[in-house]
Image (cartoon, coloured by chain):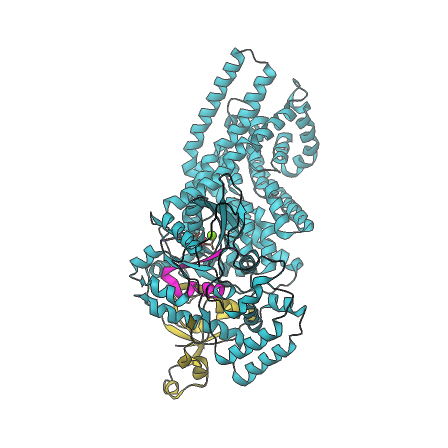
Chain colours: A yellow, B cyan
Amino acid sequence: MLIYPNFKNLDISKNYLYGSSKQQMNTMNKKISLADSTVNSIVKVEKIVTGEKARRFLADLGVLEGVKLRIIKNDLGPILVEIKATRVAIGRGIATKIEVTA
Amino acid sequence: MRRSRFNQGKKTYKRKPHGRRPHWRKPHGKLPGGKPHGVGRPFVDADSDHTIEHRIAFLGNPNVGKSSIFNILTGSHQHIGNWPGKTVEKKEGHFLLSDEYFSLIDLPGAYSLSAHSEEELITRQYVVEERPDLVCAIVDATRLERTSYIALQALELTDNIALIVNMMDLAEKENIQIDRHKLEKQLGIPVLLVSAFDNNCIIRIKKFLYDALHTEKYTFQPAFLLYSQKLETMINSVSRQISDRTVLRDYPTRWLSIKVLEGDNWVISKLEEEYVLDDIFKKIEKLKKSEKLDPADEIPKRKYKALENIVKKSVIGYKDFKEKKSDKVDKVVMHKFWGYPILILIYAAFFLITFYASGPIINGLDYLLTSSSEIVRGWLLAVNSPIFLTSLIVDGILAGVGAVLLFIPIIVIFYILIAVMEDSGYLARTAYLMDSVLGKFGLQGTAFLSMIMGLGCNVTGIMAARTIKSERDRMSMILTNSFLPCAARLGVIAFLTGIFFKPWVAALLMLALYTLSFLLVFLSALFFKLFLGKSETMPLIIEIPEYRLPRLKNIFYLTWERAGIFVKKAGTFIFIASIVIWFMGNIPYGVTPEYTIAGYMGRGLAYITEPLFGFDWRMVVTLLFGIPAKEVVISALGILYPGVSLVESLLAAWTIPQAISFLVFQLTYSPCFATLATIRSETKSWKMTAVGFFYPLIVTSLITVAVYYSLLPFF
Ligand SMILES: Nc1nc2c(ncn2[C@@H]2O[C@H](COP(=O)(O)OP(=O)(O)OP(=O)(O)O)[C@@H](O)[C@H]2O)c(=O)[nH]1
Ligand SMILES: [Mg+2]
């Protein structure tokens, strides 16, 4: 039994990084850091520029480029996000190193 | 999987190799040395005749209910609670089904099978090197996609794998429907949907495991995850290079190649013993530059993509980003401002409830013990037992063991409250809330979990420090955990404050003592930072579970297990300690207490402690006896202050500054022997163990002197 990758979406990250025409229309989609995102919004992870270790750990939790998160809490202290039905607190330090678009 | 050959005469148990097996597993089948793949474990000659042993390993994310299932199947009482990272060591248990012996192994929860943390390394080494007959991945039905990631990784590592989807009761409440057949078909492994709270789940899970190991009902043809073309080319080229390796022969080649591409340090360093992998790294670099494709990102991405597809096809009713009740509660409980008063309130309530609720129980027990020891004394005198023996039994054993029994109610109530906090999910929130506070001291929020566990018992607290990602923080938490008064010391504190002060003063004093403890831990973290050097700081990333109604059963067993240790200790260690203390306090027999062994010892030490802390010889001896185990402090008091009632004797003997000084000193002075042993085993260093013993002792002495002398003028 094989699980074929969905080739249609193969370059999902690439598309977004360079911005397809559809994306460019949406000038609303400015890149901000996760630490600046607004509560209750759903954001998409664009780029993760943390250290290697944190990056791996985030990947294990499903926080990858191209994935959507819901911001549950973002005021003081770590940022609470929902990722694939799991609530994860992410320290403010690395949250500033995660770029998202609203 | 074929039916096992079970011939009465022959004591061999063979499992047929799987029907279709990915090519890369074949070479491992006939290795000299290691057990050939696909052959089951040999017989174990237990009491019954032919018992087959099956070893089944449970793996999965933290907090998906592995230990819950493990416990109901094996009848053990492993730590269960609603926060990630309770199980830190692998635990074994077993059950019997139709004459066959099933050993279960409960592994620590892990998010993946990479080597980022100790848990993950333990898990994957177990799976590969110990070769369990079945790896059972446990996932959470309400978060199927997220929690199945590790199962998908395990699929690359082993063929003998089954999936248990737990928490179906919660999924049903959320109207999530999971199609088991579709899941089975896509993953190619047996799947069971279950809830650990169901009444019939025990037999269902047992039957499932039995079937998975025995019949043809399930086909093991684990899905073969294909990556993108570029990655596959890379994987193949690495595979070709390492296929004739002599190291890591137990691990599948394809899996190793994937790990090399992912940059797994453990795998790479092992392989580099034999190969020069430089050109592979060069290729990876090239790929990163020219194609903007980093295998370390791409591989997990592919896995999640595959999972997304699987879940899309087999789950109905799952909605992304649904606001749950939990979130509403958290709006208040984790509020940036209100969160903290609530936290303080909850913890204060915690101690006050313990304190107030246990008062009457203690008084009752005290009355019971005094009257019963009088009865025993009368009875012993009536049978003309020697005075010596009567005194040993009544003033030694009964007084010593009885005194410990006195504070068991305190311990039980305290443990119940901790268990409620653990199982409701609030504990994980406190770690979150404390992160900003602890950050000021260079610690992470997760360190708070080990501190709270330490309030129950320092041994548990130190073990819980394993989940702390930064090595320096972990060391600092291990060394300072004994600053936190464990339940045994809580007993002493509640008992003594209750004797000497009005309830509200006592409660305040108790809170002050606990604040002091926490402050010491925090400040020591700053202090140790100077010595333990820099370590890579891992920023906080922690899963916050949803609130759940605490389960009576969980709370009962958590309390039962923990408080049970104290009762057992009272019957064994304390019993013997009481006899020893009585002898030391009564030999030579008949002299005034000052001239007994304990008297000489105490008076010698009191030359130092009397001017410093105000401790007379009895107090010193008490504290000395308390070094191995803190409960002994109360026993020793019971024996060294004889009289009708311990309460009256102490009130007569101590002044208020002395009492406070004693309370402060016993709060933090030194870890008990069990804690020391744990420090040693967790740090693997005698030097650190010595630090763990003397550092608290020195700090406590300094503080006690300060407290004693600042109190003296007022009384
Ligand atoms: N509603 C519901 N709750 C469950 C079920 N199974 C487990 N739980 C709860 O989930 C929480 C975590 O369970 P554990 O068994 O401690 O989880 P674990 O996987 O061993 O966690 P770690 O040891 O931390 O890795 C506990 O509060 C359990 O009571 C279930 O089937 N339904
Ligand atoms: Mg567990």
Asked whether B152 falls inside the magenta stretch, the response is: yes
Asked whether B289 falls inside the magenta stretch, the response is: no
The answer to whether residue B471 is seen in the rendering is: yes
Q: In which image quadrant can residue B473 be found?
A: bottom right
Quadrant in which the C terminus of chain B is drawn: top right
- In this view, B4 is above or below B227: above
Quadrant in which the N terminus of chain B is drawn: bottom left
- In this view, B132 is above or below B153: above
Q: Position of residue A65 (x, y in %)?
A: 46, 75
Nearer to me, B101 or A71: B101
Instruction: Report whether A32 appears left or right of B277.
Output: left
The answer to whether residue A78 is seen in the rendering is: no
Q: Residue at x 65, y 45 (%)?
A: B693
Q: Position of residue B681 (x, y in %)?
A: 62, 49
Instruction: Report whether B373 appears left or right of B614.
Output: left
| Outermost bottom residue | A21
Q: Residue at x 45, y 51 (%)?
A: B67
| Outermost front residue | B9
Q: Which region is colored magenta?
A: B131-154
Nearer to me, B30 or A99: B30
Q: How many marks?
A: 0
Q: Position of residue B17 (x, y in %)?
A: 49, 61
Q: Position of residue A55 (x, y in %)?
A: 52, 70
Nearer to me, B706 or B485: B485
- In this view, B541 is above or below B493: below
